[in-house]
Amino acid sequence: MGDQAGRIVVANVTKTFGTVRAVQDLSFTVEPGRVTGFLGPNGAGKTTTMRVVLGLAEPTSGSATVAGVPYAQLPHPGRTVGAVLESTSFHPARSARDHLRIYAAAAGVTDRRADEVLAMVGLTPVAGQPVKGFSLGMRQRLALATAMLGDPAVLILDEPANGLDPEGIVWLRGFLRHLAHTDGRTVLVSSHVLSEVEQTVDSVVIIAHGHLVHEGTLDELRGERAVGVVVQTPTPETLVEPLRSLGATVTRAGEHGLQVTGASAATVGHAAWEAGVELHGLREEASSLEQVFIEMTEDVPAPVGDAAPSAQPAPGTTA
Amino acid sequence: MSGLLRSEARKVTTTKLWWGMLLGSIAFAALGVVSQIATNGLKNNPALPLNDPVTQRAIFSSAVSGYLFSVVVGIILITTEFRHFTSRPTFLLEPRRGRVIAAKLLVASAVGLLYGFADVAVSVAITVPWLSAKGVSVGWLSNGLVIVMVGALFVIAIFAVVGVGVGVLMRSQVAAVIATLAYLFVVEPLISVIPVIKEAYRYLPGAAGGALTGVSRNQVTLLSNWQGGLMLLGWGLLFAFLGWLLTVRRDIA
Ligand SMILES: Nc1ncnc2c1ncn2[C@@H]1O[C@H](COP(=O)(O)OP(=O)(O)OP(=O)(O)O)[C@@H](O)[C@H]1O
Ligand SMILES: [Mg+2]
């Protein structure tokens, strides 16, 4: 499979619903052979972007292509792209097998393929049961099976971990990584929590309020983490001034602790030694990736056209 | 396209809807026929004898009552897809939306034709032995019964297509069913008695269907057989076109 074959390109896509700008001038690229996380808080525009990529929603401006062409022009859409969107599409009275056979016919694959994908997601034992009796996790698996019918080179999955138990999440992680790393497929997975997909994804595309805020590998994102120093001392107040005179930012962390940024552990230890302050603990600590994610997505301005301004806490009021 | 047709046909056959509605349609057709024969000669039914061509046409055309279920099945076939998002995977597999809606309409008309055949067959199965028991001979061709039966079949089939169109327009299953029944049983009959607009009545879907089977309401002159058939076909095509237009233009949920 060539390099261009499985690439998703979103180019300057804007999508408005009435006055709501769901997606604004969004551009990014998703490469084959790796799992890409599509991250953003609730309402960021992830589902909308995916619907545009899949040709379900017409962008207000801009364009999206899969394997070099707009979705509607794919010669074999079912063999190129498999998708799961957030609201599942099952008739409750239909059995899992009947559901899959309906779409197998439309995809031009055999009924045997329907049984294969059922086995792939571990639903063979309940194949004949109506979907209305299925748990959320079973529904997610059936949705995934539907997406796999045409053995597609590209998978676009909207919050596929929703409703999966820890075991299911581990299974999904292995499944998606296999599809990307072993088969070389393109896998785009959305989530509103980074930690949920942190162990699954290789790259991330982060959006907030319809804008791109970060695009890159997970390692690059790790590099964005702020590194701080946590100091434990029985007399924290005696260490504040010496550290501030070095240009570090110091905040209290509990009764006997300080949180220092802008100085290494060695610098802090030296300053304490010089000031004659007794230390009980000294360690460097990187903020979590989730913290980076939250910071990235919260200080993006709200989209123009929002009716009410959101109540933002004034800076510095955090307890 | 053949895969799409198979897919749409499987959507119909994998739930119980189609045969439940088929039973309803047959029951209505049978009821229509039975009441025509049973009330013949009673004082509220013109006492034309059973061997009169008009009476025989009225009996056989009663099979058309089953159209009520074909329009409802058309509505449900499409609104169920909106409700459960089951057309989304179809549109992902075939982004040329016109083809999807064409397959839907073809399958809906096939379901309508099946209902029509069943309704007409049941009415024949009831009428023929009953009349022969009374010593009345059935004038298939001389009394124009074949035309009436083909007309009933056609009406029932077309109304399934109309149902799909109404469903695309209204999206909500309950609203679409209620609006359709209210239209056919309240609005259209009202139009037929309001002086200024009653002239338009004969062109409306219900009346056009009536013309095909020769059943009139409130003494309004209906179109001829062929005009009624063409008019109804026009309504079917209009609703199919509206369904196509909206599906092609709207975002898919
Ligand atoms: N069909 C629609 N009509 C009107 N507004 C919509 C529609 N779809 C989405 N929106 C709005 O667009 C914005 C983006 O929604 P979207 O569903 O794309 O976000 P999301 O990132 O998928 O959020 P979540 O994590 O909650 O799934 C929201 O403000 C939402 O209310
Ligand atoms: Mg979403």
Image: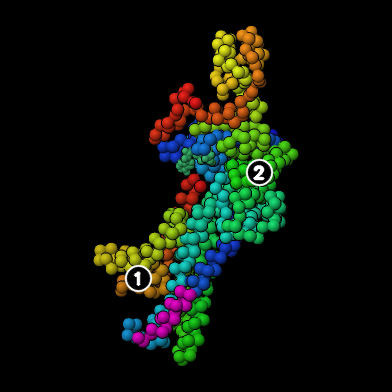
> Which residue shows up at 56% across the image and 37% down it?
A192
Single out the mark in the foreground, 1 or 2: 2
Q: Residues within 10 Å of mark 1 (few under 14, many from 20)?
A: many
Residue that badge 2 annotates: A166
Q: In the rendered image of this protein, does residue A139 appear above or below residue A279?
A: below
Residues at badges 1 and 2 in contact (C-beta under 8 Å)? Answer: no
Give the side of residue B97 with respect to residue B188, left or right.
Answer: right
Residue B222 got which mark? 1
Looking at the rendered structure, the secondary structure element under dot 1 is loop
Q: In the rendered image of this protein, does residue A230 appear above or below residue B176?
A: above
Both on one chain, marks 1 and 2? no
Residue A275 place in picture, x, y as percent: 61, 9
Dividing the picture into quadrants, the one containing residue A240 is: top right
Q: Give the amino acid type for the residue marked by disc 2 in the picture.
A: Pro
Magenta part of the protein: which range?
B27-42
Does residue A123 show up magenta in the picture?
A: no
Q: Nearer the viewer, residue B107 or B71?
A: B71
The alpha-carbon separation of the residues under discs 1 and 2 comes to 69 Å
Residue B236 got which mark? none
Dividing the picture into quadrants, the one containing residue A260 is: top right
> Which residue shows up at 49% across the image and 48% down it?
B248
Specify the principal SS of the magenta part.
helix
> Which residue shows up at 67% across the image and 37% down it?
A200
Q: How many marks?
A: 2
Dividing the picture into quadrants, the one containing residue A241 is: top right
Q: In the rendered image of this protein, does residue A297 appear above or below residue A48?
A: above
**Which chain contains the residue that carries disc 1?**
B
Looking at the rendered structure, the secondary structure element under dot 2 is helix
Q: Nearer the viewer, residue A181 or A79?
A: A181
> Which residue shows up at 38% across the image and 87% down it?
B49
Q: Nearer the viewer, residue A318 or A2?
A: A318
